[in-house]
Image: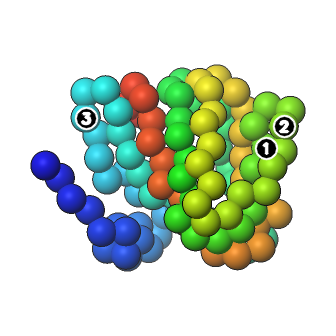
Amino acid sequence: MKVFRLDELDAERATHGGAYLRFLKERNMSAGLYALSPGETDPQGPHEQDEIYTVISGRAELTVGGETTTVGRGSVVYVPAGVPHRFHRITEELRVLVVFSPPET
């Protein structure tokens, strides 16, 4: 078993000065914490893996392919591999738990 605390992961992410911290990589999946501030630009492009986003805190819009929705605490979104997507119009500090399958490289 591996147990993680979101507040500790967020502190580690901030210490390393990046928006993303991968904290788990296993044979069939990986997981990370992604953080964006209000007004910040989400630079990510399509990934080779399927993704699940779970919004831990904050508020933003998320565009996946041609669809856009507002996401906030408790939102869970599936993003298929290869589909362009990004967060935008971030109005509150955004913290997102990201799960990739298969694991990100």
Kind of residue sitting beneath label 1: Thr
Kindly identify which numbered label has been placed on residue 63.
1
Kind of residue sitting beneath label 3: Glu
Q: Secondary structure at mark 2?
A: strand
Residue positioned 51% across, 27% down in the render: 49
Q: Specify few, some or many for label 3: CA neighbours under 10 Å numbering under 14, 14-19, or 20 or more.
A: few
Residue 18, percent from left and from top: 49, 63
Q: Nearer the viewer, residue 74 or 103?
A: 74
Q: Which residue is mark 2?
A: 67
Residue contact between numbered discs 1 and 2, judged by CB atoms under 8 Å: yes
Q: Which residue is mark 3?
A: 26
Residue positioned 41% across, 71% down in the render: 10
Kind of residue sitting beneath label 2: Glu
Count how many numbered circles sit on residues in the image.
3
Q: Is residue 65 above or below residue 21?
A: above
**In this figure, which colouring scheme has been used for the structure?**
rainbow
